[in-house]
Image: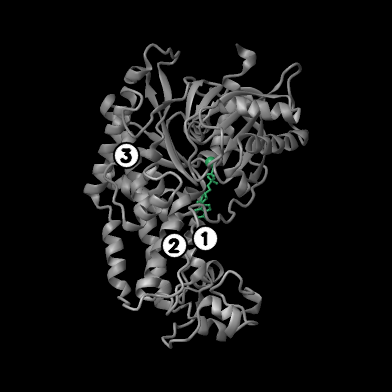
Amino acid sequence: MSVAARSPAVRSVSLWRPRTARMGVPRVRMAVQSNLVSIAPMLTKLQRDCATPLPVLRHVADAMADDMRAGLAVDGGSDLKMILSYVDSLPTVNEKGLFYALDLGGTNFRVLRVQLGGKDERVIATEFDQVSIPQDLMFRTTEDLFDFIASGLAKFAQKEGGKFHLAQGRMREIGFTFSFPVKQTSIDAGILIKWTKGFAVSGTAGKDVVACLNEAMERQGLNMCVSALVNDTVGTLAGARYWDDDVMVAVILGTGTNACYVERVDAIPKLQGLKSTSGRTIVNTEWGAFSNGLPLTEYDREMDVESINPGEQIFEKTISGMYLGEIVRRVLVKMAEAGALFGERVPEKLSTPFVLGTPHISAMQQDNSKDLQAVGSILYDVAGVAAGAPTNVPLPCTSSLCRINYFPNLGCLGTKSGTGRSSFRKSSVTQCQVNSDLSARRIVVEVCDTLAKRGGRLAGAGIVGILQKMEEDSKGTISGKRTVVAMDGGLYEHYPQYRRYLQDAVTELLGSELSKNVVIEHSKDGSGIGAALLAATNSKYKH
Ligand code: ADP
Ligand code: MG
């Protein structure tokens, strides 16, 4: 049963917004190479380079388990930071009162309030709001970003009413979900190690993000306080655990990716004397930084080199939502250049980094129509590639000439300054020679599938790595009993093929018997409620 099925949500909003270039100035390709090669061998090579047969999966799972151990032994011991969460008591269901959660993820920030009614009433009511983060704020100052967040929170708090009641004499307490690598120093403080997922906000690295939020709330005149700073994986684990005692691992597959799990305190050598009342604590693996033995392609390497964090977050760049669409775009550009995938010209719009999002590739994979109509219209909307057979007739037109000299009034679908859809005429498309026939659309879907398959299967291998580590350290933790892995994030939620590939890899690795005990379960928006629950378990009024 879905963990989230029992937690009410007041409304849902659209999650997707297009992301534009983040990795420097797009390279403009005006013409295809003259030595056209067939696309089929390129596709075969891509599939070979992305292949994840069982030995590769096994290696990834083993390496993940080894890296976890090395990261637990000493800070800096491996790619995996294995950050201590300071969460050693999970929600008990006895929590009562009004609590807020604030979730800064990557694409959006979310605010949520929940009225908790204790063992009998559990979650009496929740309400949430979601705001997408303006692109420019990702590159501005700490104050700009946190002021924007605090003002969103202030607007949301003003609308409180109905079933929500704050106990007298209390401040509104917040569970702050902050999904970037943080060196936690206590349950309500943590230093940002570095931004990831395309964020490059100046002045935040090395600072306590709770202090940054508190200062912004003060500037807004907002009388609220942070009682728990949690990673989104930790929030998801806490939220899912509230409904199901068997939840031991949580994984986020959204813009970025991460995983956390319940660890025995005595299995953490680097802890050195830190006490835990329960003998267990949640460890945030920061597995996005994992890199050992991944099957990577030339497209991954190029994307990494041009990224704002080259050489970092390689697992994240291979499996998470921010990057899958971009890798597909790079493959398609290469196929258009070297194999004339869309006719004689390379669609200019397709040269813009991140113009093709993971929601697009997922949507293309859902197209079951005979002529792949939806694929055609997505290629048209995103890249100006019109449906129809590519022509091989050489024309004296480049995209820029097209709009300046030859077809000034038609609008070229291959250019940014084209007059767009409304002015579309078949003749202009034919002249510009960027169109897709059915076989091209089939290849596009194959490319999407290849990257989704690699991503999903590697994510599955990562999960098995965590389970393996837990089982190797204490026999019986996983085998012989039900264990739940709580999943959340837009990629996992909205990409069914990816989800299936992930589950397949877990089953292949664990074998049919053991995998029956491992339940991989979507915990929708669990992290929001989870963070609010952790604010309740760590309430300032209990200490
Ligand atoms: P965040 O990770 O920013 O907290 P989400 O968990 O909502 O936010 O994940 C958003 C990400 O999920 C998007 O950046 C996108 O990569 C991915 N995503 C959203 N919608 C879809 C979709 N329909 N298909 C595949 N991936 C999607
Ligand atoms: Mg998130």
Q: Which mark is residue 355?
A: 1
Give left or right: position of 84 versus 188: left
Q: Secondary structure at mark 3?
A: helix
Q: Residue at x 68, y 30 (%)?
A: 216
Give the residue type that dot 2 points to: Arg
In the picture, the disc for residue 394 is none
Where's residue 64, x and y in %?
30, 37
Question: Which amino acid, mark 3?
Answer: Val
Name the residue nearer the viewer: 410 or 11. Answer: 410
Q: Which residue is mark 2?
A: 329
CA–CA distance in space, label 1 to label 3: 33 Å
Q: Amino acid at mark 1?
A: Val
Classify 10 Å Cα crowding around label 1: few (below 14), some (14-19), many (20 and above).
some
Q: CA distance from mark 2 to mark 3?
A: 30 Å
Residue 443: quarter of image: bottom left
* Residue 496 drawn at (x, y percent): 45, 55
Q: Confirm or reject: label 3 Cβ below 8 Å from ligand 1.
A: no
Quadrant of the rendering where the C terminus is positioned: top right
User: Is the shortest distance between ligand 1 and the CB of mark 2 under 8 Å?
Assistant: no
Q: Which residue is located at x 74 percent, y 26 percent?
A: 165
Provide residue 38's location: percent of width, then percent of height.
30, 75
Depicted 540 relative to depicted 249: above or below? above
Color theme of the render: one colour
Q: Nearer the viewer, residue 31 or 357?
A: 31
Residue 418 sits in quarter:
bottom right
SS state under label 2: helix
* Mark 3 surroundings within 10 Å by alpha-carbon count, few (fewer than 14), some (14 through 19), many (20 or more): many
Q: Position of residue 91 (x, y in %)?
A: 53, 24
Is the residue 384 above or below the residue 175 in the image?
Answer: below
The residue that disc 3 covers is 464
